[in-house]
Image: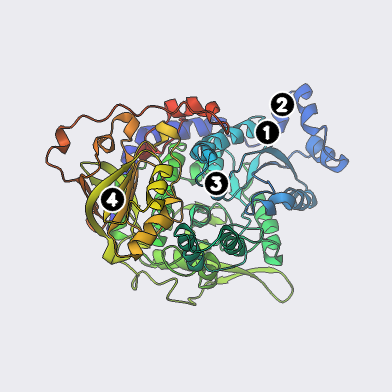
Amino acid sequence: MHSILTEITERIQERSLETRATYLKWLQSNQQRTPRRFHQPETNFAHVQASATNEEKLILRTAEHSANIGIITAFNDMLSAHQPFQHYPDIIKQTLTTLGHTAQVAGGVPAMCDGVTQGQEGMELSLFSRDVIAQATAVGLCHDVFDAVFMLGTCDKIVPGLLMGALRFGYLPMAFIPAGPMPSGISNEDKAVQRERFVKGEISKEALLESEAKAYHSPGTCTFYGTSNTNQMLIEAMGLTLPGSAFVQPQTALRTALTKACVKQMIERLPWGPNPLAIGEQLDEKAWVNALVVLLATGGSTNLSLHLVAMARMAGVQLTWDDMALLSKATPLIAKVYPNGQADINAFHEAGGTPLMIQHLLEAGLLHADVQTLMGDGLEHYTKMPSLDATSALQWTPSQAQDLDILRPATEPFSSEGGLVLMQGNLGRAINKRSAVAEEHWYVKAPAKVFQSQEEAQAAFKAGQLNEDAVWVVVGQGPKSNGMPELHKLMPCLSSLQKQGFKVALVTDGRLSGASGKVPTAIHLSPEAVDQGPIAKIRSGDIIEVDLEQGRLNNLETDFDTRTPSTEFEISQTWGQGRELFKGFRERVTPAEEGASSIDW
């Protein structure tokens, strides 16, 4: 095992000693070795079985060792990633009934799409929707009649929220059942080119829509390696679903076979079975370190630098950005998936996918093999790829390398360091997805252009006022200020200037999407402006240094450290699109570095 993996894990274990012990003590005090529904008084239990079929009622009432498994679903048919979940509950129920068990939809959770709300007022609800999902998950499971849980969700805030909620019921086994990505359409690179042409006024709205519709064209997740697919990558690497199942496309025979197999595997992990698996015990410090390594080794979404911190805390595990930074120095980048490269997630899967990636990292001593998973003890279970044999039976075989331009061994990496880096200096601490940025753009030193909003920056660009070297500073976009919206609409503008030869970068206390682009950035800057962080002291014209290679982020003005931060920033009081309902979230949210969460266990 790599020494840095041992060092970081021991550091996290020591830091988490008290909180993890408290969590496990609570978990163990709530474990039961018999079906939980039988602990309900008869007048309560009557409501549980009222809407069940006669066959289900018989099992629920009389079968002493039958499980009743709760389903938390993010199904809605406006979003392509969640539309495939429509029929999953029926498949789960039918499979369980034949095995003498039952399932019930315990509740639904909201699932918003950052792609739909980009640049819109609704984006200010996006990050907080994660906490709402965690709370909604708790509402669904608090009836205390379920012996295990299936989670149906895939996208940006949905998976983290589901997992945060599930960990409050950590004495139960839990599994995610993925939906999978849509088939490949127009390439992600071509899509980006058309967006840049649109912001320059070279193509019409109709032409842009036609391009976008070729990219987003059917059920399934988006095909770039953004937050949604990063979630799926990590969930598989943490043993929370079946091996090789994250990126199998919807509406295929293999997808259905995997759904049924996941249901059957869960029966092996019931609390009274021979191999019980409580998710709170499963997700120990080693599991969270594995998730960090996979995030870094694949150049995953910057959003996970928030989500992993928030999720791990629900299990009493204290992760920090410093852990990520130290791991990044020792973790090679072994995957190239857009925006890190040209390939999409379907090509990654065909190139060996998550199983081969896990195999490469295990061989390099960069993952803990001795972890608990849905399939049993040991991460080696997750080095095999599923397929259907000649009789349509599900089988797993070792994953084989198919394309070294997409996925490589750790001994032949694309880069010796991980895809995400910690930026720090007199402006605070921020995150950057360096793996998506060409090396010639890793260093920018240029005058600041300070904006109070994304819209203000876009207007200046369209007016031709930004055709120069500049570091765009978008202030007052942190979680406490306005919910930390993604500022992805700025990427085509900045990319256009960069291609014209200008040295440009973005610094903000807001976020970018999981498709963080090819322009150097420092995002999630903490402390944020509302907390009078250093970003609130920047003035237009200040010389800003953004150094991705050394991880430096500084204002080079000699009087900067003595300045007083502006006090004009305050917690947003805006109304419209439901934002007024989230004032309480903005008032109590933690800083970005602590997960930007409004809830704590």
Q: Residue furthest right?
A: 54
Give the Cα separation between the discs numbered 2 and 4.
Answer: 61 Å
Is the Cβ of the residue at disc 1 closer than 8 Å to that at disc 4? no
Question: Which residue is rendered at x = 59% and y = 68% of the image?
Answer: 184
Give the Cα separation between the discs numbered 1 and 4.
Answer: 57 Å
Q: Amino acid at mark 4?
A: Val
Q: Amino acid at mark 3?
A: Val
The numbered disc on residue 36 is 1
Q: Secondary structure at mark 2?
A: loop
Q: Residue furthest left?
A: 558
Vertical order, 75 against 392 (above or below): above
Q: Nearer the viewer, residue 223 or 600?
A: 223
Comes first in the chain, label 1 or label 3: 1
What residue is disc 3 on?
159
- Quarter residue 586 falls in: top left
Is the Cβ of the residue at disc 3 closer than 8 Å to that at disc 4? no
* Disc 1 versus disc 4: nearer the observer: 4
The numbered disc on residue 197 is none
Comes first in the chain, label 1 or label 4: 1
* Disc 1 versus disc 3: nearer the observer: 3
- Place of residue 403 in the rendered image (x, y in percent of width and height, measured from the top left): 47, 77
- Place of residue 424 in the rendered image (x, y in percent of width and height, measured from the top left): 24, 46
Crowding near the residue tagged with mark 1, few <14, some 14–19, many ≥20 C-alpha atoms within 10 Å = some
Is the Cβ of the residue at disc 1 closer than 8 Å to that at disc 2? yes
What residue is disc 2 on?
40
| Quadrant in which the N terminus is drawn | bottom left
* Disc 2 versus disc 4: nearer the observer: 4
What residue is disc 4 on?
471
